[in-house]
């Protein structure tokens, strides 16, 4: 099981991370990755960059250091109704390539939820047209009905993240992550295997989760970043203009 793109990472502008976009892209190239998504924190967390950063970022080249760089964000789910911390108008203007929505309890303002509340929250996010991917949602504190919600995610073409940083920074949720992955497999919901790297040293590192996915024989066709083709296919379905340009350039022809 190989991962061709890393679709969740933080750069120097989230001031708990350590490298620039250029350095991350350079390292991705060394690792043989096809693409990365830069997903710094949206405004509700104290370490997030000024909102202008996200508007300026869209003007960077689409390929940096010979790697496709998707311009993204990690949104905060801000309330039990599934509210997010950019307005609809901002999301419309930003037109980002890759939008993750995650629960960070600091931004949500509560340390846990009942299963019913968390299920409702994610069903609302499933209907949010701007969200592409659901970040590290396996926490016990926000356990949700995996079958009901992953079916909705599949219907709405949302991608569930399997976050390789979770077992390190949010330990004790490995059983939930496995159950979530099994629900995705059962319901045909696609996943992304991401490092959530905060420096070049963690980029492209997936060893904390790949053995579990191998063990449950997770199908490669449901992993959106397992190949160039899978990634372009999901970006097309999510109606991202960059997908067409990625399709025009063969991986071998990239600088
Ligand atoms: Zn996060
Ligand atoms: Zn993150």
Image (cartoon, helix red, strand yellow):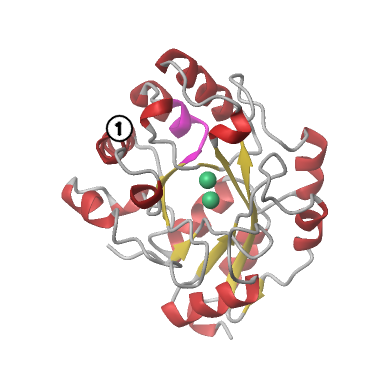
Residue occupying image coordinates x 69% and y 51%: 96
Tell me if 160 is positioned left or right of 184 in this view.
right
Residue occupying image coordinates x 69% and y 39%: 44
> Relative to the observer, which residue lies in front, 54 or 50?
50
* Residue 153 within the magenta-colored segment of the rendering: yes
Give the image location of residue 151, x and y in percent.
40, 27
Residue holding disc 1: 183
Q: Mark 1 CB in 8 Å range of ligand 1? A: no
Residue occupying image coordinates x 47% and y 23%: 112
Tell me if 250 is positioned left or right of 15 in this view.
left
Task: In the rendered view, tell whether residue 37 sits above or below residue 112.
Answer: below
> Relative to the observer, which residue lies in front, 142 or 3?
142
Question: Would you say residue 151 is visible in this rendering?
Answer: no
Tell me if 179 is positioned left or right of 251 in this view.
left
Q: Which residues are magenta?
A: 151-159
Give the image location of residue 94, x and y in percent.
77, 49
Give the image location of residue 75, x and y in percent.
63, 41
Tell me if 183 is positioned left or right of 114 in this view.
left
């Amino acid at each position: 099981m190989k991962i061709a793109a890393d679709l969740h990472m933080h750069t120097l502008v989230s001031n708990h991370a350590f490298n620039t976009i250029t350095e991350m892209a350079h390292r991705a190239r060394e690792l043989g990755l096809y693409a990365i998504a830069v997903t710094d924190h949206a405004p509700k967390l104290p370490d997030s960059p000024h909102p202008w950063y996200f508007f300026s970022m869209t003007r960077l080249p689409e390929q940096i250091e010979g790697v496709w760089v998707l311009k993204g964000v990690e949104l905060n789910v801000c309330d039990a109704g599934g509210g997010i911390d950019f307005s609809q108008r901002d999301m419309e203007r930003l037109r980002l390539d890759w939008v993750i929505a995650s629960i960070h309890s600091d931004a949500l303002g509560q340390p846990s939820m009942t299963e019913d509340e968390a299920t409702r929250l994610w069903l609302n996010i499933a209907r949010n047209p701007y969200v592409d991917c659901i970040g590290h949602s396996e926490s016990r504190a926000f356990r949700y009905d995996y079958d009901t919600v992953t079916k909705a995610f599949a219907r709405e073409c949302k991608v569930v993240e399997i976050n390789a940083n979770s077992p390190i920074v949010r330990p004790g949720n490995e059983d939930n992550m496995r159950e979530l992955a099994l629900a995705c497999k059962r319901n045909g919901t696609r996943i992304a295997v991401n490092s959530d790297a905060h420096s070049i040293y963690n980029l492209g590192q997936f060893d904390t989760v790949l053995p579990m996915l191998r063990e449950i024989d997770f199908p490669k066709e449901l992993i959106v970043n397992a190949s160039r083709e899978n990634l372009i296919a999901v970006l097309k379905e999510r109606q991202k203009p960059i997908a067409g340009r990625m399709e025009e350039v063969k991986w071998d022809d990239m600088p």
